[in-house]
């Protein structure tokens, strides 16, 4: 059946962890997102691995973040406006179909032996531009296929799904690595086929509510003004950006696996998968909570513990300790992501949800991209362990300063069904 935000089911009583899966279109969106997220994460790890194999350079590894950041700046906010102006299902179909092209291109270049680092950088830029259209449309669409009372549950389930895919993606790299890297790229392209098919089966309309508007800078600016006025939202965006800028760890896992723990593709796959396992547990924790009324407090606690987990990873001399610390990073990050996403969807009206979601995506992804670049440069100067340790300390400092600056986060209380 198709749900709307006004569906009365589940307004009272405790919501089970799997409640949103009773809605057919949410299940389809769920499955589509699973395959897309698996493909996206798998390709990111393959790209990091191949760049380091070709160049043996932490600086070039860090530059990957620059080629992710540039398209985000130009396309990300426009993607949010598009989700508020055009059919959200068609946007998702376009983005996932176009994501096939970089994967196939890199697969053929690797197969022929013509692959170079700049090829990967170009593919990363294209993937980033196309991928930046997905999150606003996906999140805005989710509010259409579940009732308001189930929204936090649906977001937590989506996070669990995404993080499960984040684990499977690197593990698939380890499996493909038993053969060759081009196999990983071709498998990656194939994962988009079931994602596209699931979207084609959706029955709920993806057309935004309200009067139609033309695409313009003023439309994008309206979304920014809304986020600025919603101080709780702005605080979560700003804190997430600051923490990730000083404490992004993903590309450093490649250096840890090769130079510190001395493990191959399979070990790298497990190390990259450990945060995903932790993220599944983090999303599961939110699912078991059912409803969260003090979301601001939970957000602050989770991002502070993220910084502490970074310090633990930097100080981990053994592989098994690194796996545990990486899992803790995923656990704490997942909780903060679910809370931030839920606040965005609850506080924004339908006509602004795409743009509000785009600010969530842009601040997170831009922080990831710039943090990746910063991590690579700093690791080249002071080493990977020191980079992680100092980044964790800096992240905790950002959270303390943000908690003092935005008291709204401590005071914010969310009703079950606003």
Image (cartoon, rainbow, N blue to C red):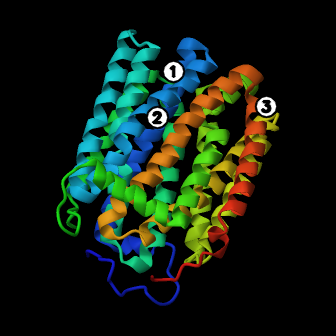
**Is residue 276 in sight in this rendering?**
no
Mark 1 → mark 3, Cα distance in angstroms: 24 Å
Q: Quadrant of the C terminus?
A: bottom left
Mark 3 → mark 2, Cα distance in angstroms: 25 Å
Callout 2 environment at 10 Å: few (<14), some (14 to 19), or many (20+)?
Answer: many
At mark 2, the secondary structure is helix
Where residue 147 appears, as percent x and y from the top left, is 36, 77
Where residue 360 appears, as percent x and y from the top left, is 47, 54
Q: Residue at x 51, y 73 (%)?
A: 17
At mark 1, the secondary structure is helix
At mark 3, the secondary structure is helix
Q: Residue furthest bottom?
A: 12
Among numbered discs 3 and 2, the one appearing first in the sequence: 2
Q: Nearer the viewer, mark 1 or mark 2?
A: 2
Quickly name the residue at label 1. Answer: 50
Among numbered discs 1 and 3, the one appearing first in the sequence: 1
Label number found at residue 19:
none
Mark 1 → mark 2, Cα distance in angstroms: 20 Å
Where residue 85 appears, as percent x and y from the top left, is 22, 57
Q: Nearer the viewer, mark 3 or mark 2?
A: 2
Callout 1 environment at 10 Å: few (<14), some (14 to 19), or many (20+)?
Answer: some
Q: Residue at x 50, y 48 (%)?
A: 363
Q: Quadrant of residue 106?
A: top left
Relative placement, left or right, of 177 versus 403 is left
Where residue 335 appears, as percent x and y from the top left, is 60, 61
Quickly name the residue at label 2. Answer: 69
Q: Residue at x 64, y 38 (%)?
A: 249
Q: Quadrant of residue 388?
A: top right
Quickly name the residue at label 3. Answer: 386
């Amino acid at each position: 059946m198709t749900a709307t935000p006004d569906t009365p089911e589940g307004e009272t009583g405790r919501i089970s962890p799997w409640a949103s899966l009773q809605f057919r279109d949410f299940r389809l969106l769920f499955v589509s997102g699973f395959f897309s997220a698996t493909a996206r994460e798998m390709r990111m790890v393959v790209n990091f691995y191949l760049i380091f194999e070709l160049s043996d350079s932490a600086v070039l590894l860090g530059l990957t973040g620059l080629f992710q950041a540039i398209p985000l700046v130009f396309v990300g906010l426009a993607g949010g406006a598009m989700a508020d102006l055009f059919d959200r299902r068609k946007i998702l179909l376009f983005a996932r179909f176009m994501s096939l092209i970089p994967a196939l291109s890199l697969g053929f270049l690797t197969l022929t032996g013509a692959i170079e680092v700049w090829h990967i950088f170009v593919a990363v830029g294209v993937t980033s531009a196309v991928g930046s259209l997905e999150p606003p449309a996906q999140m805005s669409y989710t509010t259409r296929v579940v009732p308001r009372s189930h929204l936090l549950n649906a977001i937590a389930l989506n996070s669990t799904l995404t993080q499960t895919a984040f684990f499977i993606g690197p593990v698939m790299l380890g499996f493909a690595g038993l053969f060759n890297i081009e196999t990983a790229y071709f498998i990656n392209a194939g994962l988009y086929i079931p994602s596209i098919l699931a979207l084609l089966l959706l029955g709920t309309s993806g057309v935004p509510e309200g009067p139609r508007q033309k695409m313009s800078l003023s439309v994008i600016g309206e979304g920014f003004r809304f986020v600025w006025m919603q101080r709780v939202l702005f605080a979560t965006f700003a804190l997430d950006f600051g923490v990730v800028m000083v404490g992004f760890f993903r590309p450093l896992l490649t250096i840890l696996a090769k130079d510190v723990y001395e493990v191959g593709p399979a070990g790298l796959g497990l190390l990259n998968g450990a945060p995903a396992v932790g993220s599944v547990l983090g999303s599961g924790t939110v699912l078991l909570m059912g409803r969260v009324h003090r979301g601001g407090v939970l957000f602050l606690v989770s991002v502070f513990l993220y910084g502490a987990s970074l310090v633990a990873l930097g100080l981990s001399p053994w592989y098994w300790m690194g796996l545990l610390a990486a899992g803790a990073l995923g656990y704490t990050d997942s909780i903060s992501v679910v809370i931030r996403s839920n606040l965005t969807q609850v506080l924004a009206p339908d006509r602004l949800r795409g743009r509000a979601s785009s600010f969530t995506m842009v601040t997170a992804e831009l922080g990831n991209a710039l943090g990746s670049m910063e991590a690579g440069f700093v690791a080249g100067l002071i080493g990977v362990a020191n980079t992680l340790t100092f980044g964790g300390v800096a992240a905790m400092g950002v959270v303390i300063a943000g908690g003092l600056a935005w008291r709204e986060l401590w005071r914010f209380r969310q009703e079950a069904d606003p």
